[in-house]
Image (cartoon, rainbow, N blue to C red):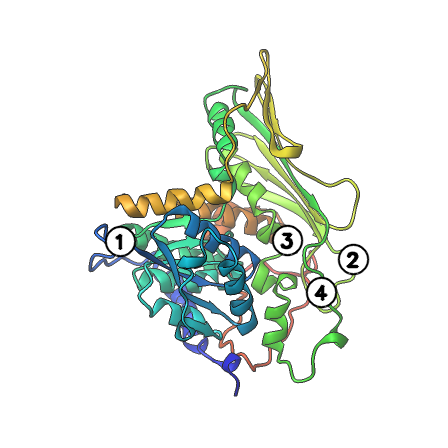
Amino acid sequence: MTEQSVNDNTAPAATRRDFIKATAATGAAALLVSGNYAFSQGSDQIRIGLIGCGGRGTGAAMQALNADPGVVLTAMGDVFAEQIDSHQSALKGEPSVAARVLVPAEHKFVGLDAYRRVLDTNVDVVLLTTPPGFRPLHIKAAVDAGKHIFAEKPMGTDAAGVRMALEAVRLAKAKKLNFANGFCFRKNLSHREFYQKIHDGAIGQVRNVHATYLTGPVKSMPPASSRPAGMSDVEWQIKNWYNFVWSCGDGLIEQACHSIDKILWAYNDVPPVKCVATGGRVLPNNEGNIYDHIDVFYEWADGSRGTMAQRQIPCQANDNADYIMGSKGYASIEHGWQPAIHTDPPWKYSGRQRDMYQVEHDELFACIRKGTPMNDGEQMARSTLAGLMGRMAAYTGEEITWEMMQKSQENIFPPHLHWDGNLTIAPMAIPGKYQFA
């Protein structure tokens, strides 16, 4: 058995399902706090561990290392050994951080249990950047281990997982652990000023938000004939994780969740009361099961609306923008992400620009140093659940309410996941046949 055949997901999967049953029966569990898990401010060194060594994970590690001169990378985990080696080499090739990439061979962990082994080291902070289907398990385990957390968006790929992660981030707050999420537009300086002006009444009461995430395909599913002989179902699906709902959540969740987060931001993070949606697949997807387009139509209690247009099909008319209509005017963030308010007089952002990915780590590590914990887990959960609400509406063809989503028992994460195991691919959802859970 190779190093990649490590099996540690039987217990975590069972724990997740036990949690779901318990919360369904008794509601939110009481949070018990013991110990002091805050970062020791007396140390100059902050040790980080990277869990998920793809491109986004490497970017997050680079930004964490650049956020504070005392940050050192001491542990890495992934299901593919080559991911660890290639991205460690990439980091060591950057002169500004190379000397602080200190990952010995015994701290490079491979397998489905790699996250646990990273957490068992003496890292202070973990960067969670695996495919989002694994996010709830990893968040819970990191909080239980007393680590500060950066977790990429979204929070999970089903409602049960989001609730599990939400319980963990509430416990993190009680333990005074820092929790920062990857909804990076919230860290964009121009967007912050723009939305603050919206909240201050620059266009009056917000009546409608139209968001677009119209792009080409992200990761196409290769034909089944290209699958190497002997490769298990689990390895094949994780290797092509973007094409399966359990691991990526669909394009609306994995990518366009940024736009859904901004819709909620415009509405002061008040969730919609209901939505309907349409969606489907135009391009062949071999044996994958995600849609390549979904349009969601949200409604708030006062009749205000929000629309989300998401598409991942090769087209010329791409757009990634936000259009906000108010009772006194409208505002937009269009091509180039230049915020503008179209009133008399008009306004455009003219302040300084900073890399929003860097800002999210700068602020996290500044809070760790100061001992003043930040925690934006509630916002992460809310925006992820709003995205799942839209996906459920598209998949079922039904009107889905916020109350329904809060009680949803949808749980699509595979139980008893083994690296060498079989994993049947769920059929693509068909509206009218797919059932709300």
Measure how far apart labels 1 and 3 are at the Cα level. Answer: 36 Å
Type of residue at label 4? Met
Q: Which of the labelled discs sits on residue 251, or is there none?
A: 3
Left or right: 413 as drawn, with respect to 115: right
Expressed as whole percent of the image width and height from the top left, the position of residue 121 reads 33, 69
Q: Which comes before the other along the chain, label 3 or label 4? A: 4
Measure how far apart labels 3 and 4 are at the Cα level. Answer: 13 Å
Q: Which comes before the other along the chain, label 4 or label 2? A: 4
* Callout 1 secondary element: loop
**Badge 4 local density, few (<14 within 10 Å), some, or many (20+)?**
many
* Callout 2 secondary element: loop
Is any part of residue 191 visible from this angle?
A: yes
Residue underneath mark 1? 39
* Callout 4 secondary element: loop
Type of residue at label 2? Leu
For the point 54% across and 26% down, the residue is 206
Is any part of residue 375 visible from this angle?
A: no
Q: Which comes before the other along the chain, label 3 or label 2? A: 3
- Quadrant housing residue 282: bottom right
Q: Nearer the viewer, mark 4 or mark 2?
A: 4
**Badge 3 local density, few (<14 within 10 Å), some, or many (20+)?**
many
Q: Which comes before the other along the chain, label 1 or label 2? A: 1
